[in-house]
Image (cartoon, rainbow, N blue to C red):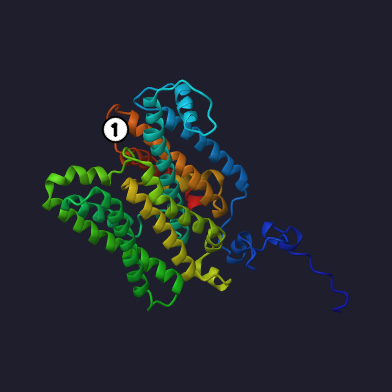
């Protein structure tokens, strides 16, 4: 009887193997690929299939155009050939070009540092936002989620209202931002020690601790502002963000921190893909979720705090850019993180162009420009079915 039983038909998985069943998809650490993780968890988390190279190339092309526009556009009204000649005049192999010293100074000492700093700040804010969204699995997370904005704002306000040297303002803002996140993480981790599930409980506790710490530091900042009303103009100018006083020394000050932060985030982009299936599932597959969270949060905070130190509080970049990348190029962090950094650089350069030309010769705070773009974007995300599905 049993010998004559017909053989069972192969399952759909065996007959039609998916991307996660292909050999050679495992990472160097022996973990299955992100597609395998999504299939095993049954969460339906599909990793984007667009090739990272194409998305990076497209974002780089946009960035190049943004850089050209950022250097060429300004109240001085320099022509594009004049800008090109001014750029060439400082190169060691430059040919003899007829360009005035004033034009060279405008390009090299005013416009170019502003564009470079805007690119660095935009790249870090967008990358930090994408990292926070991945590690907390929260599509509304941004670089200021854990108190970076409140801590940086309080540090800068203290320097302004006390009349201390303006050279200390970036250091105070950086220290305030890092200190706020350190306090948030300590309080959140302490509150979650009694929870049963280490992954979800600690994430929720850390986010809630960030809300509490941000509220406390914002209250302290408001009190200082109320006690020093003559300094409100300077405080609000910093809070709204800007790149008008960008210098090469600012770039040299934050560049090492931004490079380290970006390198750490990019090195962990594959593990963020694994985390998309859920913290409990990722832990069962060998991922040290607590260590991953601490590493990513520390790197993202270092980058965001460095950006805040030299640019003020520029909002929405860490939400607009990563979500745009997800909706157009896929949800895999192999694509989201690098493309968000490149796209964030281009986005902030273009926002700065708008900030210095909308009311030329006066300037609009760049934070106002990003907020004007960010509010309609939120409405689009809320009403778009595709956005809701991709961001779930």
Image quadrant assignment for residue 57? top right
Q: Position of residue 269 (x, y in %)?
A: 54, 57
Within 10 Å of the Cα at label 1, are there few (<14), some (14-19), or many (20+) other Cα atoms? Answer: some
Q: Is residue 379 left or right of residue 262?
A: left
SS at circle 1: loop
> Quick check: 200 left or right of 42?
left
| Relative vertical location of residue 360 with respect to residue 26 in this rendering, above or below | above
Q: Tell how many labels.
A: 1
**Quarter of the rendering occupied by the N terminus:** bottom right
Locate residue 35, reporting x and y percent. Answer: 62, 59
Q: Return the residue nearer the eye: 273 or 245.
A: 245
Of 326 and 39, nearer the camera is 326
Identify the residue at horizontal 53%, vertical 29% (top origin). Answer: 94
Q: Residue at x 58, y 43 (%)?
A: 55
Q: Choose between 358 and 371: the one closer to the eye.
A: 358
Which residue is the extreme one toward the right?
A: 4
Residue 43 image position (x, y, % from top left): 55, 62
Q: Is residue 274 visible?
A: yes
Q: Pointer 1: what residue?
A: 363
Residue 176 placement (x, y as % from top left): 29, 59
| Residue pictured at 88% horizontal, 77% vertical | 3
Is the residue 384 above or below the residue 189 in the image? above
Query: Does 128 sit left or right of 43 as displayed?
Result: left
Residue at horizontal 41 percent and vertical 28 percent from the top: 104
Q: Quadrant of residue 211?
A: bottom left
Residue 142 seen in this snapshot = no
């Amino acid at each position: 009887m049993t010998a004559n039983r017909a053989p069972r038909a192969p399952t759909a998985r065996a007959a039609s193997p998916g991307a996660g069943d292909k050999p050679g998809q495992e990472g160097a650490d022996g973990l299955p690929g992100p597609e395998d993780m999504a299939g095993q968890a049954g969460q339906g988390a599909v990793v984007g299939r667009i090739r990272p190279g194409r998305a990076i190339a497209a974002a780089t092309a946009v960035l190049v155009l943004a850089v050209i526009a950022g250097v060429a556009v300004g109240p001085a009204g320099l022509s594009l050939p004049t800008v090109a000649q001014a750029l060439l005049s400082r190169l060691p192999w430059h040919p003899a070009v007829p360009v005035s010293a004033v034009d060279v100074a405008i390009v090299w000492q005013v416009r170019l540092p502003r564009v470079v700093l805007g690119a660095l700040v935009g790249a870090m804010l967008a990358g930090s936002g994408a990292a926070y969204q991945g590690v907390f699995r929260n599509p509304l997370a941004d670089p200021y989620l854990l108190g970076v904005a409140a801590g940086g704002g309080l540090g800068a306000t203290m320097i302004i209202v006390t009349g201390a040297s303006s050279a200390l303002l970036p250091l105070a803002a950086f220290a305030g931002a890092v200190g706020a996140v350190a306090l948030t993480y300590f309080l959140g981790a302490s509150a979650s020690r009694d929870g049963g599930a280490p992954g979800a409980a600690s994430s929720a506790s850390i986010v809630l601790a960030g809300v509490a710490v941000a509220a406390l530091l914002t209250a302290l900042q408001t009190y200082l502002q109320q006690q020093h009303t003559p300094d409100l103009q300077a405080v609000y100018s910093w809070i709204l963000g800007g790149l008008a006083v960008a210098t090469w020394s600012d770039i040299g000050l934050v560049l090492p921190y931004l490079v380290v932060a970006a390198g750490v985030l990019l090195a962990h982009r594959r593990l963020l893909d694994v985390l998309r299936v859920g913290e409990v599932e990722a832990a069962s597959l060998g991922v040290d979720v607590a260590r991953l969270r601490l590493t990513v949060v520390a790197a993202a905070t270092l980058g965001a705090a460095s950006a805040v130190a030299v640019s003020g509080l520029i909002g929405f970049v860490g939400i607009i850019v990563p979500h745009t990348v997800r909706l157009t190029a896929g949800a895999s962090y192999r694509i989201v993180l690098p493309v968000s950094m490149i796209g964030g650089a281009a986005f902030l350069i273009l926002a700065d162009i708008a900030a210095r030309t909308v009311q030329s010769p006066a300037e609009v705070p760049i934070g106002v420009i990003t907020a004007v773009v960010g509010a309609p974007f939120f409405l689009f995300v809320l009403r778009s079915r595709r956005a809701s599905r991709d961001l779930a």
